[in-house]
Image (spheres, grey):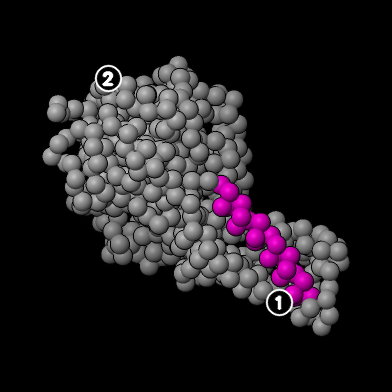
Amino acid sequence: MKNNSGLRCSGPANGLASWNSRDFANEASSVIAISRSRGNAGQLGGLSLGTPAYRWVLLIGDLLLIVLAGFMSGMARFGSPVNTLERYKIASTITLVLYPSVFYIFDLYNMGRFFRSWETAYRSAFAVALGGLCAILMFYAVPYGQYGRGIMAIQMVFIWALFNFWRWAFGFFFQKAIPKIPTIILGAGYCGKTIYELLKSPLSPYEIKGFLDDDPEKFGQEKSAAVMGTCNQLREIARKVGANTAILAIPNNRSKTLIRNVLDARLQGIHIRDMADVYEQLTGRIPVRYIGDQWLLFAEGFYLLRKEYIQRLKRLMDFAVSGLLLFLTAPAMALIAIAVRMESPGPVFYRQVRVGKSEKPFTIYKFRSMRLDSETGGAQWAAERDPRVTRIGRVLRITHLDELPQMWNIFNGDMSIVGPRPERPEFVKLLEEQIPYYAVRHSVRPGVTGWAQVNYRYGSSVEDSERKLEHDLYYVKNMSLLLDFKILLRTIGVVLLGDGAR
């Protein structure tokens, strides 16, 4: 049997990996307009169940239980049934909007989260506390139709208890009983094994029946799922094992014979998915090691790179919000400056060169959180419990208040509120040599917060930077004002829980 080299996964070919961001941005308007069939958008956090229906089930359940909590709190407070929807129309409407919003802020609609855990109870306690605080502020600002303080406190307890019961029940009945799509993976190389490791999760919507590969040495291997045959047997084996979907896990060197066999299978009713599309849909990341130049050229997305009016609107919003925050936080920044100066000698602000849009360097401003001699030996990654961080600096990092001076960078146009975090030139040079397509992240303005920041921990290595790049490329590809709004909401939860601080 002839060995088909096209079935061996390899890293991306040279080409786009060596493009700079200016080339990419210029080509976006002409090349990226060519598209292919669009899959479901990627979801927040880890694995998604592959359909938004389950999130709607969660949301509808939450709304019903919030109403139930209102009735129960009225019963507990007054000793008799009270129709809170009728008696407190405005307050009930506010709570029905407010609590689902704070649940989203604390990532409690992430379908990849294991809901039967103490972390869910912990996050939901923060969410209910924040929702109750916001409700108190809103009710006292608009006193007409407000709850009494007693019924509000009782309702918060009931909401937390019912929320956790509902999440536990959802995790037990829905997450374990998720219907699976019988699937075959085409290609048993590194690319195929990577998607297999992802899809064997109990939260995956796919049931992997096995691999097809043209390398005879891989036939019958049982280390993961078995290699059941060659790719020209796709239709025959799919019928035999009852698979109606095939995932093409061969990013490069796809032979004419392979393409013809896959096309024939598609015309016979087998659903063909690209490995990178499935990976993006389930994780909210783009697998940089397993995409080729053609995938990046023809992938659906990258709309905001060519829509000038959206870019201008985003810039106008950045300008207005950063200017307002500079004004409102000026007293707090003055107190922080005094605290930094009192603890250790040296400048209050830390200035550092970072790489911005189109690889243009700019100076970023932060409150100094480390000793003056922190980088006498050259640029270093931040470490867990970094000894170079001062006591005040540790508090600033946990609360992310050290980032406040970056409002000036946003006001000045060097940065945006939402975007990939800017990196230092020394690290950019290293990362562009080791990580494919790293320069693509420079096709947009860097941001104070971003998709990587709300979904991944603080990076301190090349491996962490690669994972964060996968999130950054997802953001660049799917960038929209709605995605920016989602990231800003999630950022509130990240800041309040201290996630990612070092």
Q: Which mark is residue 67?
A: none
Q: Please state the horizontal and vertical placement of residue 234, each as a whole percent of the image.
A: 31, 33
Give amino acid for label 2.
Lys
Farthest top residue?
30
Q: Nearer the viewer, mark 2 or mark 1?
A: 2
Image disc number at residue 154: 1
Stretch in magenta: 52-74
Quadrant placement of the C terminus: bottom left
> Relative to residue 482, is residue 399 drawn left or right?
left
Q: Between marks 2 and 1, how big is the CA–CA gap? A: 67 Å
Q: Nearer the viewer, residue 323 or 16?
A: 16
Give the residue furthest to the bottom: 79
Q: Quadrant of residue 228?
A: top left
> In the rendering, at what x and y percent does residue 369 appear?
37, 58
Dot 1 amino acid type: Ile
Most foreground residue, 388 or 303: 303
Could you tell me which residue is drawn at 79 percent across and 69 percent down? Answer: 147
Mark 1 burial class by Cα count in 10 Å: few <14, some 14-19, many 20+: some
Residue at 86% over, 66% down: 87
Q: Which residue is mark 2?
A: 256
Query: In the figure, 468 relative to 159: above or below?
Result: above
Residue 59 falls within the magenta-colored stretch? yes
Q: Is residue 349 above or below residue 216?
A: below
Q: Position of residue 463 (x, y in %)?
A: 26, 48
Q: Is residue 398 magenta?
A: no
Give percent across and percent down for residue 229. Answer: 23, 37
Query: Which residue is pictured at 42% across the width and 38% down the height?
Result: 244
Which element carries disc 1, helix, strand or loop? helix
Q: If the image is split into quadrants, where does the N terminus sit?
A: top left
